[in-house]
Amino acid sequence: MNSLSLFATLLFTGFLLMGCKPYKPEGQGITGTITWQEGNQMPMMIEEGQADTRSSPKPIKRTVRVYPLIKFSDLKMEEGLFTAVAEKPITEVESNESGVYSIQLSPGRYSIFIVEEGGYSPIFLMGMAMSILSL
């Protein structure tokens, strides 16, 4: 009798688990701010009374594209920008006038590029503020 009730319990549990949907986290992804900064940004000695001549970062509107994780060997670079990406994008979003963007993504590893005139810039070359968080 005990083995029959154990078997029935396991069978019932199996049927319950078959009806469960796969885990899909909601409210996870990335958010960041895209800024543009020009000129010499090297550290410099500023004497008292002198103004700092370095420019401040300015927010810009750009398209952010998310790809599956890509190897550098699968990219083509010309004049400092990637001009060809071997994969198709998973998703893309445009930042607002303040440079802020947010993309819903499942946990994983991705390659993220900023669309520029003439190619793509990866986020680590842009000096872009990006954080992974739960939205």
Image: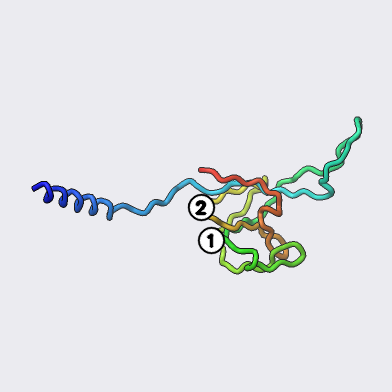
Badge 2 amino acid: Leu
**Colour scheme of the rendered structure:** rainbow
Using the image, determine if residue 76 lies above or below residue 63: below
| Residue 93 vertical position relative to residue 132 in the rendered view, above or below | below
* Kind of element beneath mark 1: loop
Q: Position of residue 6 (x, y in %)?
A: 16, 48
State the mark number for residue 68: none
In front here: 134 or 109?
109
Residue 64 horizontal/vertical position (percent)? 62, 56
Residue 61 placement (x, y as % from top left): 68, 52
Q: Are marks 1 and 2 in contact (CB under 8 Å)?
A: yes
Q: Which residue is mark 2?
A: 105
Residue drawn at (88%, 38%) of the image: 45
Residue shown at 67% from the left, 45% from the top:
98
Indicate the quadrant where residue 58 lies.
Answer: top right
Identify the residue at horizontal 25%, vertical 51% (top origin). 16
The residue that label 1 is drawn on is 90
Number of residues whose C-alpha sits closer than 10 Å to that of mark 2, classed few (under 14), some (14–19) or many (20 or more): many
Residue most extreme to the left: 1
- Where is residue 50? Give x, y as percent: 91, 34
**Amino acid, disc 1:** Ile
Which one is nearer the viewer's eye here, 135 or 78? 78
Picture residue at 16% right of the left edge, 52% below the top: 7
Q: CA distance from mark 1 to mark 2?
A: 10 Å
* Precedes in sequence: disc 1 or disc 2: 1
Looking at the rendering, which quadrant does residue 116 occupy? bottom right
Instruction: Identify which residue, 28 or 75, lies in the foreground.
Output: 75
Check disc 2 and report its element: helix, strand or loop: loop
Taking 32 as reference, is 109 above or below it? below
